[in-house]
């Protein structure tokens, strides 16, 4: 039987970052991951980091390659009505975002954890979490055909939307809030130079399109698509044709195409569970909340949870004071709901929800208003770069 201070379920960005920050601050932890290391490393997700996320990765001592290889973007474009409008993030907020793929974040974190001889166990099966409503939580799992038990002080549920931790909270003790969108994103990755230096979010009557990138030679493009779409009906030429049609003409003309190296479809969802803490179990990142990818808040929100939780746990182990731990849920939820609102709004503004032409005219009118109003642009920009972090609630 093993013993640790914090048992972390899931080695996605949330679990790895929490593990690293706790380790650097002297808190012992074990990470259990269902998938193989290779599988976790190969998942392609979003690639835009807020400055607060970059700062946290620097604190976690995994920022060196990030600082060397990231692309700093001081703006992005909104495409609509055949034209392209640049949102000047730097001008409106003094801040910028960093383009650096989640795949790279995972690689940096995994390398750092393994270099520090972390207890990071991949390919585990049948994880079960128990006893977290009392003072002695227990985690059971199987690995290499044997069953194992970990006794711990706390369990961090960093196991994503489909994980076991949220489902282990007794019925009635938590409430969830959800919105399913009637479309998905069809994404491709291709080794071609990006069509523009900055991202382009394009509203079009045929549906939304996004031009993004991973580097100056690797592009990531998305098209809004029906939920029941299948990948076989989207050979590369069809994807590129449809993308061109949904972009402002000057952008479409500059598009460089090439063979895709990855293609996938993801549904869009908003989801929040409340509270994020049940006894000695914490929900972190995608286990607790999902946002649609418009605005790239998912990873940043996960990092924001980790920032609050690691500080609360470190404070507890240093001083015995559990106030920050008790405030974890309320503090995170304020930021989460703001990001849920922003991601929902940005999705609503840019996507096609129906054939309703009135609704499309309203979107165009809102885009016209937005791009003509410094007040509205400031609001968009400050949400996009990431709202400031609140200070933890003062102790009584
Ligand atoms: N036991 C162990 N591990 C599990 C279990 C389980 N029962 N269920 C899920 N996992 C693992 C998954 O295999 C995955 O590696 O938990 C991890 C959860 O990782 P993510 O889903 O990436 O969630 P999170 O770390 O919170 O990251 C949030 O990253 O994944 C993106 O879109 C997401 O950008 C968001 C951010
Ligand atoms: C991405 O590059 O994958 C990406 C960028 C911005 C978004 C969503 C996804 O808003």
Image (cartoon, rainbow, N blue to C red):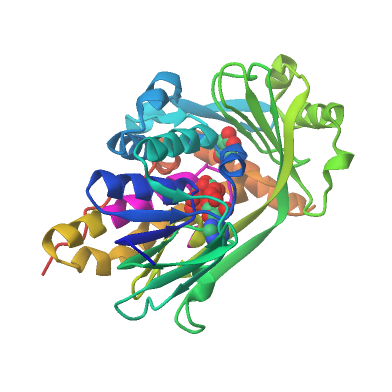
Residue at the spot 85% in from the left edge and 26% down from the top edge: 237
Residue 130 lies left or right of residue 216; in this view the side is left
Question: Which is more toward the observer, 232 or 342?
Answer: 232
- Given the current orientation, which residue lies at the most extreme bottom position? 172
Question: Which is more toward the observer, 227 or 40?
Answer: 40
Residue stretch rendered in magenta on the structure: 288-310
Q: Is residue 343 visible?
A: no
| Residue 145 among those drawn in magenta | no
Residue 26 higher or lower than 252, as above or below: below
| Residue 296 among those drawn in magenta | yes
Residue 301 lies left or right of residue 171; in this view the side is left
Question: Which is more toward the observer, 266 or 178?
Answer: 266
Q: Position of residue 284 (x, y in %)?
A: 42, 58
Residue 17 lies left or right of residue 125; in this view the side is left
Q: Position of residue 77 (x, y in %)?
A: 56, 28
Q: Position of residue 232 (x, y in %)?
A: 87, 41
- The quarter of the picture where residue 114 lies is top left
Q: Is residue 375 visible?
A: yes
Residue at the spot 55% in from the left edge and 64% down from the top edge: 146
């Amino acid at each position: 039987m093993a013993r640790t201070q914090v048992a972390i379920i899931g080695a996605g960005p949330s679990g790895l970052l929490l593990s690293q920050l706790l380790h650097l601050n002297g808190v012992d932890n074990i990470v259990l991951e269902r998938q193989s290391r290779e599988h976790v490393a190969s998942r392609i997700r979003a690639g835009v980091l807020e400055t607060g996320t970059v700062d946290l990765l620097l604190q976690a001592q995994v920022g060196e390659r990030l600082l060397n290889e990231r692309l700093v973007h001081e703006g992005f474009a909104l495409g609509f009505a055949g034209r392209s409008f640049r949102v000047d993030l730097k001008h409106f907020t003094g801040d910028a975002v960093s383009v650096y793929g989640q795949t790279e974040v995972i690689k940096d974190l995994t390398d750092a954890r393994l270099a520090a001889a972390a207890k990071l166990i991949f390919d585990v099966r049948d994880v079960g979490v128990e006893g977290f409503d009392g003072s002695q939580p227990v985690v059971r799992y199987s690995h290499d055909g044997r069953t194992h038990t970990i006794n711990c002080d706390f369990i961090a549920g960093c196991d994503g939307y489909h994980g076991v931790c949220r489902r282990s909270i007794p019925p009635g003790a938590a409430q969830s809030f959800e919105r399913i969108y009637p479309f998905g994103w069809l994404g491709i990755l291709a080794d071609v130079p990006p069509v523009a230096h900055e991202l382009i979010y394009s509203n079009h009557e045929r549906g939304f399109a996004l031009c993004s990138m991973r580097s100056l030679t690797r592009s990531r493009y998305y098209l809004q698509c029906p939920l029941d779409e299948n990948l076989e009906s989207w050979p590369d030429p069809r994807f590129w044709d449809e993308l061109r049609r949904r972009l402002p003409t000057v952008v479409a003309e500059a598009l460089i195409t090439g063979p895709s190296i990855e293609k996938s479809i993801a549904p869009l969802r908003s989801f929040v569970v409340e509270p994020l803490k049940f006894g000695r179990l914490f929900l972190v990142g995608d286990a607790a909340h999902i946002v649609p990818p418009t605005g790239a808040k998912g990873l940043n929100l996960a990092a924001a949870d980790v920032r609050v939780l690691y500080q609360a746990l470190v404070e507890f182990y240093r001083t015995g004071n559990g106030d920050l731990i008790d405030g974890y849920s309320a503090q995170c939820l304020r930021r989460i709901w703001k990001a849920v609102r922003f991601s929902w709004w940005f999705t609503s503004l840019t996507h096609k929800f129906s054939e309703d032409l009135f609704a499309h005219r309203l979107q165009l009118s809102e885009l016209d208003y937005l791009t003509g109003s410094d007040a509205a642009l400031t609001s968009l920009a400050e949400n996009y770069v990431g709202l400031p972090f609140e200070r933890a609630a003062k102790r009584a």
